[in-house]
Image (cartoon, rainbow, N blue to C red):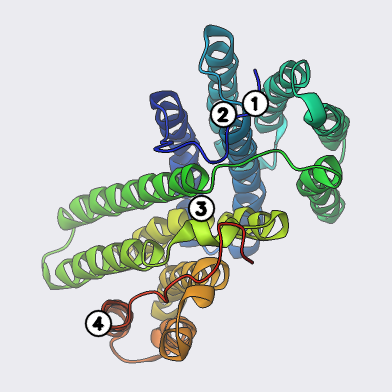
Amino acid sequence: MQPRDPAQPHRAASSLELFFDLVFVVAVSITSAQLHHALSHGDFVHGITSYAMLFFAIWWAWMNFTWFATSFDTDDWLYRVTTIVQMGGVLVLAAGVPAAFEHGDFTVPVIGYVVMRVAMIAQWLRASRRAGDLRGATRRYAVGIAAVQVLWVLFLLIPSGTLQLIAFVVFALLEVSIPVFAEYRRQTPWHPHHITERYGLFTLIVLGESLLASANAIIDASRELESFVPLISISVLTLVVTASLWWIYFWPPHHRAITTFGRSLRFGYTHYFVFAAAAAFSAGIEVELDVLTGESHLSIVEASLTVTIPIALFLLAIWWVAIRDNADRVVNTVVPLGAVLVLLDPVLPIPVAITAAVMASIVVVLVLRPPAAHHGGPHAS
């Protein structure tokens, strides 16, 4: 297991990586469904904090494997088996999501998360054997991950409430600081096109899952409503917004966003909000449908916000991390302004139509104003 060539031509995602992503989407789907139930019952604080905590575990385990794979993927039998162990861990995590939402019991999710992270420790230790100058970095990864896993086990001893939330924030910050600690002297190699392809593929899968969940909810609601007009408007919104999010995400050349170590950290960490927002969008659509069918007593404004907040968060995150450095002044005004307008939509008379119109308008602007030409070498910042 030697470091991969970061300039390897035609590097693409492997079938194992795609399989890995599909298993993670199981956890994303279950977590999004639980968020829907919490929001529909008006349990905003508990629902959002539980979602944020569980999604962190999903995103961080996925991201760590993805960056490791771009540097050391050998695709031999041992690498595959260790990866499948990680996939088993995320399935365990997914099984514990309902109990975490309903009772604040994070025992099963933590067990699944630790399984994934212990497998990652084994990968880093294996890589350290032939890492050459990168041996120190690989061992620091292994030591850092192991130390934080002890803290996550201790996390289970903390009673639910404010103290548990504070502990989570501290432990999560320690997790995200591991790459900085491990690579401050010498960075592991990454393949810009491969790594951004991996993020793009996961975004596609999450958007597809969100579209599927929304479609299933619309079909179920059609059996309870006499008029199809509200369902048609929500169906149009769902398709237009999902297509627009796809279009906007893939407008900039993402490989330009990870030309330095600092920029790669920004790219990876900001995608927490991209992925979480994309998955939460379907939960918002389902909440809207619950209000229509009388299964939720939220106000129209509250229900609309469960849709518009994820959209705005997605727009701002992808603008910050990838669009703004490749766009002219017009695009850099339209995208964040569009996010603000989407947030204001719930207080207007026809929020569904306006949200769809805003998203379509952003896409039109992007079509008329392509990304700026890149000047400089492959490592230009």
Of the pair 202 and 115, the residue shown nearer to us = 202
The reply to whether discs 2 and 4 touch (Cβ–Cβ < 8 Å) is no
Task: Note whether residue 138 is visible.
Answer: no
The reply to whether discs 1 and 3 touch (Cβ–Cβ < 8 Å) is no
Residue at the extreme front: 377
- Residue holding disc 4: 353
Circle nearer the viewer, 4 or 3: 4
Identify the image quadrant of the C terminus: bottom right
* Residue that appears at 51% across and 67% down: 322
The reply to whether discs 4 and 1 touch (Cβ–Cβ < 8 Å) is no
Q: Which mark is residue 90?
A: 2
**Label 1: element kind:** helix
Of the pair 218 and 353, the residue shown nearer to us = 353
Where is residue 47? Give x, y as percent.
Answer: 59, 56
Seen in the picture, residue 349 relative to 209 is either above or below; the reply is below
Q: Residue 269 occupies which quadrant of the picture? A: bottom right
- Residue holding disc 3: 35
297 relative to 226 in the view: left or right: right
321 relative to 146 in the view: left or right: left
| Residue type beneath disc 4 | Ala
* Residue that appears at 25% across and 48% down: 216
Seen in the picture, residue 180 relative to 360 is either above or below; the reply is above
| Residue type beneath disc 3 | Leu
Please tell me which of labels 4 and 1 falls first in the chain: 1
Tag 3: Cα neighbours inside 10 Å, few (<14), some, or many (≥20)? many
| Residue type beneath disc 1 | Gly
Seen in the picture, residue 337 relative to 85 is either above or below; the reply is below
- Residue holding disc 1: 112
